[in-house]
Amino acid sequence: MFGSPQMAARLAVLGFALSILQVAFVSQLPIAGSSADLLPLTVASVGLLCGSVPGAVFGFAVGLFADIAYAQTMGLSSLVFTVAGYAAGRFLELRDPQNPIMPMAVGAAITLLTAVGFGLMNFLLGIDAPVSLLLLRLILVTVVLNALLALPLHALVRRALGSDLPGDGRRRRRRAYTTGGLSPLSQARG
């Protein structure tokens, strides 16, 4: 599922470190009345890089840790982040995104998906949560902040996982053909 024990260990360390960073620092730093949320971006990046099943498992683990750290309804973040990781991974499997700004678009979409998912789950569980235009503004500010943070965080996740990424060799070969010189069609005919 994760390819190797080294990759599973790297994902565990990455999830733990970014969850602690989110809880201890980023959530305490308000920007325009809201704060960025690194957890959906991390889950989306792992889904985009590793696939749907590793993305879903990573999302579940990060969500469970977030539920414990924030002392909130147990399993709520796990459910929402599992769906987010699976959705980002399915996007990779169906589209094979090569566009360099794709993490930004997927990060914004996953942030919106998780915000709506949390709101829907709170409503279904009967947890009183105020719904107003202020809440919509806070969600939109978070989506914009996360879209801006998506590219550097995706690069950090890619670097942290290193050569353990599945399909890494395939992407290198594809780039080699587009640069010329290695394609059999580019050889001189004689």
Image (cartoon, grey):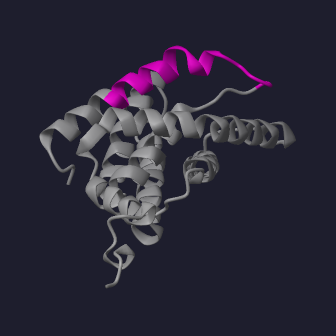
Query: In the visual, does 30 lie left or right of 89?
Result: right
The image shows residue 19, relative to residue 129, as above or below, that is above
Q: Residue furthest bottom?
A: 190
Residue at (31% x, 38% y) in the render: 161
Residue at (69% x, 34% y) in the render: 145
The image shows residue 59, relative to residue 22, as above or below, that is below
Residue at (31% x, 85% y) in the render: 190
Quadrant assignment, res 75: top left
Could you say where residue 22 lies in the image, as x and y percent from the top left? Answer: 51, 23
Q: Residue furthest right?
A: 133
The image shows residue 48, relative to residue 131, as above or below, that is below
Of residue 41 and residue 60, the one placed in the foreground of this image is 41
Query: In the visual, does 40 lie left or right of 29?
Result: left
Residue at (64% x, 49% y) in the render: 112
> Which portion, as a residue range, is magenta?
14-33
Of residue 140 and residue 163, the one placed in the foreground of this image is 163
Residue 124 visible from this viewpoint = no
Residue 27 among those drawn in magenta: yes
Quadrant assignment, res 89: bottom left
